Amino acid sequence: MTGIKEMAGKNGAAKLSRLRDLMKTVVVGTTGKGVDAYIVGSEDAHQSEYLAEKDQRRAFISGFAGSAGTAIITSDKALLWTDGRYFAQALKELDPPEAWTLMKEGVTGTPTQASWLASNLSPKSVVAADPNLMSNSAWAPIYASLIAAGHNFVPLEKNLVDLVWGKDRPGSPSHKIVAQPLKYTGKTAGEKIELCREAMRTEGVSTLVVTALDEVAYLLNLRGSDIAYNPVFFAYVVVTMEEVHFFVEQSNLTDEARQQLKDEGVDPNYHPYEEVDVYLKERSSTSEGKTWISDSSSYALHVSCGAGEVNCKRHTNITPICVMKAIKNPVEIEGMKKAHLKDAVALVKYLAWLDDKVKSRNGEPPVTELSGSAQLEKFRAEQEDFVGPSFNTISAVGAHGAIIHYAPTPETDAVINDHEFYLCDSGGQYRDGTTDVTRTVHYGVPSAFERECFTRVFKGQCALAKAIFPTMIKGNYLDILARKSLWEVGLDYLHGTAHGVGAFLNVHEGPMGISWRPHPHDPGLQVGMFLSNEPGYYEDDKFGIRLEDIEVVVEAATPYNYKSRSSLTFQCVTLVPIQSNLLDLSLLTDSEIEYLNRYHAEVLEKVSPLLQGEENLQALTWLKRETLPIFR
Ligand code: ZN
Ligand code: ZN
């Protein structure tokens, strides 16, 4: 993201003024008018969370480089909506700061984009957005509320930000697409397609449109590297009862990838990537059957499938792939566990190395946020089948820890010291699994308040990890467990508690999650799902604390079995010590102490055999010390 920040961090005023000129001069559809308000979201044509540089339009126009946010530009206003993870970062990055208004999502009193537009524009205004870059589910409510308020909301195929960006806009990435073999996936592409067809028969649809990049990669057992940190590639798939249509830059497919598709029983019809909308228009006008296209797919593709037409037959639920991908099969579960064990070895080596460097300076240059995260990546790279980080490492000292998605830059790089918290949230992509882990450490003596916050965050993590709950319950119901200890004393954190994690796929995946906000497509928690468990506490301009493990949902043994429904619980797959000397033991229950001691015993048992040999002595010694049982 550094590149985009550099680009985005300059000339903000000039970019806004050029965009406003274009808004005035472009003529929109049948309105015969220019654009009064232009919406720039943070999605690509596949509604991805992480973007290729060419798609970082909202960062380009606003300066704000966080992963979530929507900009709305009118003739005299520029507004940015983002959520609690990014308030502090947005205030620092918006360019120029005086031109932008931050709209804090999730804070009482902040209007939605639709209601702000409906009530702040002059009558009969024209609002426009690129229909490829907004999901159908996001488009529909804005459309409804603008039309109700007497405005127009129109799709503008010409992207105005791209015109401002001009020749400096990066080109399309075009990297090799490789096979992800059966020993990691546990299910052939052919079997997955058949499962899709079963679901299609059940729903009475004849065409399934797959637009999310991780769903395409999962379905075909292929991986790529078109987007940083996410092993995906640009493509669409359309599944019918007889055929598979693959819209992809064919020259990127390796011979092994093609061969594996054949071996796994899939012989797709290849089409150029750009032709998906033409194909869908043709098919929806000639085919009798219903088309399954998720509401999370772009509004433009919904139109190609006939949205808005009288006889349009669409099924807009999440795709069957979305849930299939979230519920890991035994081979994927094994792979994820192996990846987390390797990742634990890397992180233990890093934390042991860091502990030593901070405490015994030896005249060497101090470790900083950047040099620390580079060292961590080195340790990860030593591990078998490591591909790269699963996101930009959050390596944050003191006040930087309060910027929830902080990533150090040479300008902000701070020394990891012995008087402030150091929060490190990082993860790896391994061929057998994806990891995501946060530990917060302190090499001196924290204040009583800092210690209390750390303890309450731990209590929340522990409460969620130990939860026993009925099968299929939605994640939303469990969120209180992670917050209870903070809420009791008037504290909280402004982000969700858990997201799904892919198996050598995206570090954030749905459809389930645990948050105070319900996840609209949560199918209910089920055995084999992997979720993070990451409560935190953040004191703006002072410090940030977060503890994050990845947990797999497993069966729980309960003495009773109400109405024959089974019970579930979590099993932690992250194996990295939690700094127990930061805990205020007087705030912990016996069962929390027992939980931590059991966890640390497991960490020692599983990780220490991988830290043998002279070269690992420092890490092993540190691991033994950090996993010692605690007593009141
Ligand atoms: Zn994380
Ligand atoms: Zn996470």
Image (cartoon, grey):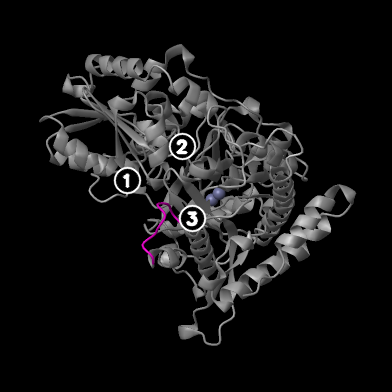
Q: Position of residue 112 (x, y in %)?
A: 25, 44
Residue sitting nearer the eye, 367 or 102: 367
* Front position among marks 3 and 2: 3
Q: In screen coordinates, is 442 left or right of 118?
A: right
Q: Which mark is residue 46?
A: 2
Element carrying mark 2 = loop
What mark, if any, has residue 536 been given in the picture?
A: 3
- Does residue 60 belong to the magenta stretch? no
Extreme residue in the bottom direction: 559
Q: Tag 1: residue type?
A: Glu
Alpha carbons under labels 3 and 2: distance apart: 31 Å
Occupied quadrant, residue 95: top left
Instruction: Tell me the SS state at disc 1.
Output: loop
Q: Which of marks 3 and 2 is nearer the N terminus?
A: 2
* In this picture, residue 226 sits left or right of residue 284: right
Q: Which amino acid does label 2 sit on?
A: His
On the question of residue 159 being in view, the answer is no
**Of pointers 1 and 3, the one earlier in the residue sequence:** 1
Q: Name the residue under label 1.
A: 105
